[in-house]
Image (tube, rainbow, N blue to C red):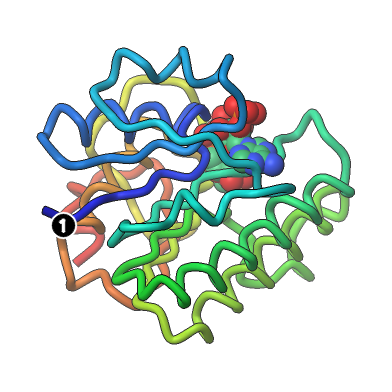
Amino acid sequence: MDKILVIGASGKIGKKLVKQLAQEGQTVRAMVRTAEKQQEIDGYDAEVVIGDLEGAFEHALEGCDTIIFTAGSGGHTGADKTLLVDLWGAMKVIDCAVENSIRHFIMVSSRGADNPENGPVAIKYYLVAKHVADDYLTRSGLTYTILRPGRLLDEPGTGLITTLRPADPNQQIISRDDTAQAVIHCLHNAATDNKIFELYRGDVPIAEALR
Ligand SMILES: NC(=O)c1ccc[n+]([C@@H]2O[C@H](COP(=O)([O-])OP(=O)(O)OC[C@H]3O[C@@H](n4cnc5c(N)ncnc54)[C@H](OP(=O)(O)O)[C@@H]3O)[C@@H](O)[C@H]2O)c1
């Protein structure tokens, strides 16, 4: 059975993914930064490895087939951490994935990463980081799927989304639940290979929207 590595496993989306994949009976390895974070994953029936994108993480990829990258430095940190985690960390993982012949790399990116020039000035550095990391992945030779969710909400998922960007920025939103479901759909459906999707709250079932 394939082994799936979740990078960012202690994050809000990461935890949902680890939990559901383990419940599905998938073989999951969850990468977290610290032993303290490890405790948060301990009940999930997943193997946990400690790794830091700013330090050593390469061991986490050994023996894995698929990577889900849902790590990010978060809005509470500055541009320096965005550079080191969202950009440089992602690029290092992509290089390591090539070395380890990873079969599928799923990247949780962001709306606006397609064209940082059009995004809000306040988060342009973040969109540039996501853009360059996504671009690096598409050029890596790896089989990839890139998901670019809108602003993430902690509300229950509906299973209904759209990949078409709403004109109103206030409507460019999606729950973390639905984002996690979209990731899992991509994991199981080769039709999403080598594709990039934006994700927003909508009225189309996930499987149909990502067809
Ligand atoms: N917030 C939004 O509205 C929004 C919109 C679109 C896309 N996104 C993107 O969606 C992704 C996931 O979102 P989320 O809400 O699940 O994020 P989150 O809860 O902040 O989780 C981020 C994860 O990245 C990990 N991480 C941070 N620095 C790391 C490092 N140096 N090495 C290893 N892991 C590290 C965190 O670990 P710790 O638990 O140890 O901190 C955490 O597990 C992020 O990439 C974010 O940029 C967010």
Q: Is mark 1 within 8 Å of ligand 1?
A: no
Looking at the image, which residue is at 33% across and 37% down? 178
Amino acid type of disc 1? His
The image quadrant that residue 128 belongs to is: bottom right
Q: Quadrant of the C terminus?
A: bottom left
Q: Is residue 85 left or right of residue 202?
A: right
Looking at the image, which residue is at 40% across and 31% down? 48
Seen in the picture, residue 81 relative to 106 is either above or below; the reply is: above
Ligand 1 shows up in which quadrant of the image? top right
Place of residue 194 in the rendered image (x, y in percent of width and height, measured from the top left): 35, 78
Q: Which residue matches tag 1?
A: 188
Place of residue 83 in the rendered image (x, y in percent of width and height, measured from the top left): 81, 56
Q: Is residue 24 left or right of residue 167?
A: left
- At label 1, counting other C-alpha atoms closer than 10 Å, the crowd grade (few under 14, some 14-19, many 20 or more) is few
Q: Is residue 157 left or right of residue 155?
A: left
The answer to which of 2 and 115 lies nearer the viewer is: 2
Place of residue 52 in the rendered image (x, y in percent of width and height, measured from the top left): 64, 42
Q: Is residue 170 visible?
A: no
Seen in the picture, residue 198 relative to 36 is either above or below; the reply is: below
